[in-house]
Amino acid sequence: MTARTPRPFEAFRRRGIRRLTEWVAVAAVGALILVACGGGAKSSAPSVGPASDLQSGSNAATFVNGSPGVPVEFLGLKVTVSMMTQGGDDSGPWLTVHVRAENAGGQPGANPNIGIVCADNEQTGGWQAASTFTVGQGLPAGSFDEGDVNLLLPGDSRTGQMVPECKTPAVVRASTTGVVPRSGGPAGGFWSIADDIVARLNATRKQ
């Protein structure tokens, strides 16, 4: 059979199909790159997790989940919570917590901040001045402090005003009173409060 020379229109059509195929291939590669990079113009701001993540330490391991009677170490402190009981007076309830804080570092420190944190609320409750463990009190290197601290529900100002309900799961959370260095590691610890104790605190709060 004799080879046939393509007509001008047919040659033009073939070149157009070849170029179209090349453009489709380039577009497909571009789409794959866009998907791999996350696609579209998305914000680079980090996502914010719920309060439960902050309490559990799943966000950058900020807080360590402690067990009763077992020390939790953070930023040179060893903090132990060994007992939780309900208490109160005419102004409302509190949670009595037995705490031991040891300064295991080589520098002067202070007793940790400690308070009740309820679910879906990052506000930390206050404490009663009559406590035998003083929050924020100086703690020389190599020394320890031990006593009971009476913790108030978040929002309890002891002025007779309404106190919001504390939702479960609730925790007692301890954290440093100073500046947290950016060297990594935990900045505090938390201990779970039994749901029945939280229920009793809620039942006797100002409503």
Image: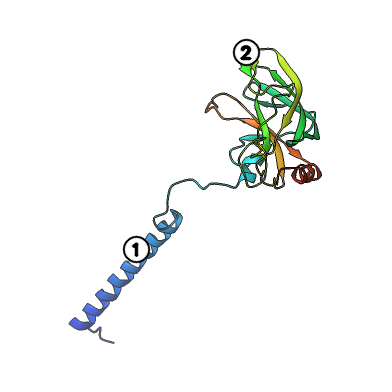
Instruction: Tell me if mark 1 has few (under 14), some (14-19) or many (20+) residues whose alpha carbon lies within 10 angstroms of its own.
Output: few
What residue is shown at x 61% (from left), y 26% (from top)?
176
26 or 190: nearer the eye?
190
Q: Amino acid at mark 2?
A: Gly
Q: In this rendering, which labeled residue sits more in front, label 1 or label 2?
A: 2
Depicted 1 relative to depicted 78: above or below: below
For residue 170, what is the image quadrant? Answer: top right
Residue most toward the bottom? 1
What residue is shown at x 79% (from left), y 43% (from top)?
200
Q: Residue 73 appears at what percent x and percent y?
A: 68, 26
For residue 34, the mark is: none
Q: Amino acid at mark 1?
A: Val
Q: Calculate the distance from the C-alpha at mark 1 to the C-alpha at mark 2.
A: 62 Å
Apparent side of residue 123 relative to residue 70 in the rendered image (left or right): left
Apparent side of residue 55 relative to residue 92 in the rendered image (left or right): left
What residue is shown at x 28% (from left), y 70% (from top)?
19
Q: Residue 165 appears at what percent x and percent y?
A: 69, 47
Apparent side of residue 34 relative to residue 124 in the rendered image (left or right): left
Depicted 162 relative to depicted 188: above or below: below
45 or 16: nearer the eye?
45
Label 2 residue SS: loop
Q: Residue 46 appears at what percent x and percent y?
A: 49, 45
For residue 90, what is the image quadrant? Answer: top right
Which colour assignment does the render follow?
Answer: rainbow
177 or 14: nearer the eye?
177
Where is mark 1, residue-wise? Answer: 26
Image quadrant containing the N terminus: bottom left
Label 1 residue SS: helix
Q: Earlier in the sequence, mark 1 or mark 2?
A: 1
Instruction: Tell me if mark 2 has few (under 14), some (14-19) or many (20+) residues whose alpha carbon lies within 10 angstroms of its own.
Output: few
Q: Residue 77 appears at what percent x and percent y?
A: 66, 22
Where is mark 2, residue-wise? Answer: 106
